[in-house]
Image: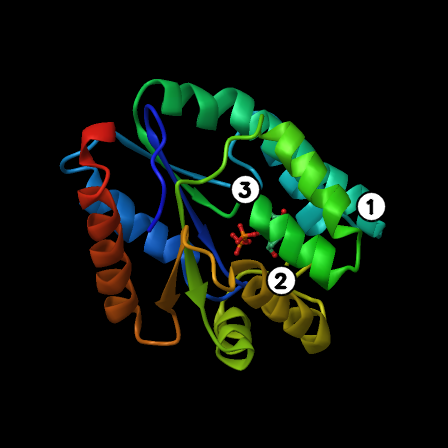
Amino acid sequence: MCSRIKRGIFLTLEGIDGSGKSSALKALYTELSLQYNVIATREPGATPIGKHIRDVVQSSSEPLCPRAEFLLFAADRAQHFHEIVLPYLADSYIVISDRMADSSLAYQGYGRGLDKEFIKTVNEWVTRGVKPDCTFYLRTDQTVARERVNRRLEIKTTIEKEHNDFFQRVTDGFEAIFNGRSDVIVIDASQNQKKVHEDIIQAVYTFLSFTKDAV
Ligand code: TYD
């Protein structure tokens, strides 16, 4: 079972592009904000500085080398923690982030092949060692997720344009990172959207029922 933190509660959603995190986050926010102080946030791009970083990592016309890409995500994370995550946790909010440190491990570590221990060290440093109380992993088949991304009307980002073998490495990475972790709840995200939302809301309530005196 997931662990507690002293003041607020920090939840993260993780999964590959097209796993449905963003809509799950909206559904969770709508539900939880009826009874709790909750903030929905994201990486990259939750802060004004982060929005500039997001533009560079998502749509730069110049190719980014993997190390620079990781350091930009890490810089976004540092700013995100400084401006949003830590202050809201200190104020006893439930903070829910669409992606966080595990995305760097999966995309830059497993996907790009960077040193995973180094990524973990930098993640620890930029987050001041604050870890999610619980992570919801929206697990979905790579093919299903790719089809969802392809159906979207928006222009594909730099990472979304990567080949299937990159996304397979990222998917395998998430599986390896989350395997056997007691602070991770797996949601079957290949189901229809309504069912995914019901499942994640139910899972969050179950988690909160064990931690209700924390918020
Ligand atoms: P996301 O916000 O889920 O994409 P969008 O809202 O555009 O659908 O994530 C942005 C992209 O950044 C996504 O392809 C995953 C990638 N990413 C990393 O590669 N490393 C990281 O550390 C983070 C946070 C995201």
Residue at the image position 51 percent from the left and 48 percent from the top: 99
Tell me the distance, in whole angstroms, between the alpha carbons under discs 2 and 1. Answer: 22 Å
The amino acid beneath tag 1 is Arg
Type of the residue with mark 2: Lys
Q: Is mark 1 on a helix, strand or loop?
A: helix
Callout count? 3
Which secondary structure, mark 3?
loop
Give the class, few, some or many, for how many residues have Cα within 10 Å of label 2's Cα (few <14, many ≥20): some
- Residue 176 at x, y percent in the picture: 59, 65
Tell me: is circle 3 under 8 Å from ligand 1: yes
Residue 184 horizontal side relative to residue 47, left or right: left
Residue 9 visible in image: yes
Q: Is residue 174 above or below residue 50?
A: below
Locate residue 115, reporting x and y percent. Answer: 79, 51
Of callouts 2 and 3, the N-terminal one: 3
Mark 2 — residue?
156
The residue under label 1 is 67
- Is disc 3 in contact with disc 1, using a CB cutoff of under 8 Å? no
List the residue tagged with mark 3. Answer: 43
Which label lies toward us, 2 or 3? 3
Q: Residue furthest left?
A: 35
Say if 46 sits above or below 185 in the image: above
